[in-house]
Amino acid sequence: ASEPPPADCITPPSGGIFVRTENRPAAPPQNAPTRPMAQLPIVTYDDPVLSRTAEPIERLTDELRTLIEDMFETMYEADGVGLAAPQVGRSIRLFVIDADVLLEGEEDDPQALGQRVFINPEIVHMDPETVEMEEGCLSLPGLRDTVSRSQAIRIRYLDHEMAPQELELDGWNARVVLHEYDHLDGVLFTDRLTAFRRAMHAQDLKKIRTGKMHADYPLAPKS
Ligand code: ZN
């Protein structure tokens, strides 16, 4: 009953818990932006870009740096803790996270990762032990359910400067990263539910698919 609030590129159930301005780190890991950051519209189910396998990134361009800044801005404005490039219409292997709000305010928590950029990530180890946690997704507004995933992972990736990194993650960090990683392979959390559970969401999925679901952040128009 005292489960922490949902994970992912997730909106918490009561928007007031995660106070954005206080908790938000001062600046993204890039150099200070020379332009105002932009909030990008979020692509929703069942746009084809969300089910596509995203392409690796070959080099860091100015355009990509700008995209990363805008993805952080978009994620914070939507009260999310992670955002993958396909969710803003780009089929490239990139996601950003800042899940520290899920750590309940312990600022010196060793789990606190702050803002992280993951480029061309690769999950190199998954603990066979799984854990169930409730998830939501900015691309599936209003929909949430319990998803079973590995409780701990090791991930290799390139950071915001294209430097190779490796991290061992568990708890919320592992959860958020696995959810975002799935987006790069065209997988939504609803794809991981049983057919029965998915059927329970049929009405909401239809509303999202037909553009009738409301969200508190800008959504990309339906084509
Ligand atoms: Zn998501």
Image (cartoon, helix red, strand yellow):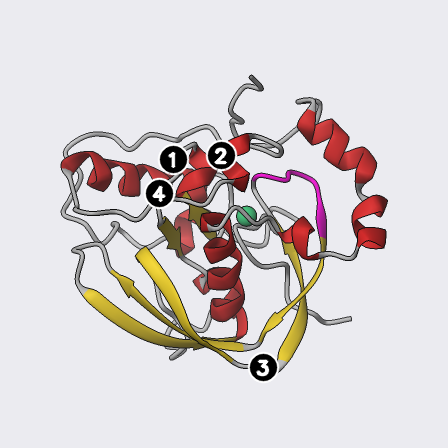
Answer whether labels 2 and 3 touch (C-beta < 8 Å).
no
In-image side of 98 versus 10 (left or right): left
Label 1's element? loop
Question: Looking at numbered disc 4 in the image, what kind of residue is underneath it?
Answer: Ile
- Quick check: marks 1 and 4 in contact, CB under 8 Å? yes
Let me know if residue 43 appears in the view.
no
* Secondary structure category for the residue under label 4: loop
What amino acid does circle 2 point to? Val
- Which residue is located at x 40 percent, y 30 percent? 40
91 or 72: nearer the eye?
Answer: 91
Residue type highlighted by circle 3 = Pro
- Work out whether mark 4 precedes mark 2 in sequence or the reverse, and give the earlier one: 2
Placement of 8 over or under 109, stated as above or below: above
Q: Is residue 200 left or right of residue 58?
A: right
Give the residue type that dot 1 points to. Arg
**CB contact under 8 Å: marks 2 and 1:** yes
Cα–Cα gap, marks 2 and 3:
30 Å
Q: Which residue is mark 1?
A: 90
Judging by the rendered image, the residue that carries numbered circle 3 is 128
Q: Which residue is mark 2?
A: 49
Q: CA distance from mark 4 to mark 2?
A: 10 Å
Which label's residue is closer to the chain start, 1 or 3?
1
Query: Tag on residue 92?
Result: 4
Position of residue 105 relative to residue 39, above or below, is below
Magenta range is 139-144
Q: How many discs appear?
A: 4
Asked if the residue under mark 2 is in contact with the one under mark 4, i.e. CB atoms within 8 Å, the reply is no
Q: Quadrant of the N terminus?
A: bottom right
Q: Check disc 1: other Cα within 10 Å, few if <14, some if 14-19, many if 20+.
A: some
Residue 76 appears at what percent x and percent y?
43, 44
Task: Measure how far apart labels 1 and 4 are at the Cα level.
Answer: 6 Å
Question: Toward the viewer: 136 or 156?
Answer: 156
